[in-house]
Image (cartoon, rainbow, N blue to C red):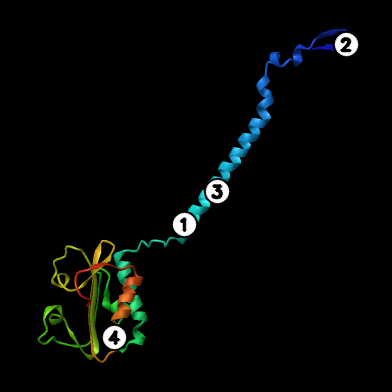
Amino acid sequence: MTFLDRAGGSSPCLALSPRLDPYPHFRYIPSMVQRMFSLAIGFTLVAAACAATRNDKQSTEPEMKTTSYAEAIQAIARDIEDIATAFSQLADFSADKHCDPERLTISYAYHTHRPQGRAGWAGAVPNPDADGIWFHIDFHDPDSMAQIHTQPVVIDRRYGDKRVMFLILEGKETKHVSAELQQILQRNGVVTPGFTGQDE
């Protein structure tokens, strides 16, 4: 192949020969850039979709509370105080008075008398009159050998690494509050992984 030069002559068209083109790969750069750009957009969209899925999952998962044992027992006591107006036997209950956050206990007695002829733990704690109540809640180490913690017939309750003891005696003429107290425990993170015996 030839072309006319300025003098009107002709010469071989060496510059246009594909075999002698010193940079033939330059012709493919636009298409390569286009493909790379498309891949980059694809990776960006996939990453955004994954991040959105992860955020949606995190938003639907319940947030774990990092509450100390002392804070938890105090929260339980406050919730009990909140329902006191609905139960006459809780008339004297006070979160400040009946909760000991250092010992991780809540103990309350209202219109009680000395136990008479009762076996087990019920024979060692104040017994309620017909209109009275006695209950005890505590967090303790699983290996505690205190007498109150070695009762064979109690529900196995847990809060974190602690076991939770819940004992209650209710007067026969009262509006029973045991179910509400158990719900309060559950709302504040106390779980029941299994049973060691019958319910209280």
The structure residue drawn at horizontal position 46% and vertical position 57%, both measured from the top left corner, is 58
Query: For residue 11, what is the image quadrant?
Result: top right
The crowding category of the residue bearing disc 2, from other C-alpha atoms within 10 Å (few below 14, some 14 to 19, many at least 20), is few
**Mark found first going from the N terminus, 4 or 3:** 3
The structure residue drawn at horizontal position 43% and vertical position 60%, both measured from the top left corner, is 61
Q: Nearer the viewer, residue 37 or 145?
A: 37
**Mark found first going from the N terminus, 2 or 4:** 2
Label 2 SS: loop
Label 4 SS: loop
For badge 3, the amino acid type reads Ala
Q: Look at the image and tell me in which quarter the N terminus lies.
A: top right
Residue 66 picture location, percent across and down:
36, 61
The structure residue drawn at horizontal position 86% and vertical position 10%, both measured from the top left corner, is 5
Residue 137 picture location, percent across and down:
24, 74
**Mark found first going from the N terminus, 2 or 3:** 2
Q: Look at the image and tell me in which quarter the C terminus lies.
A: bottom left
- The residue under label 1 is 57
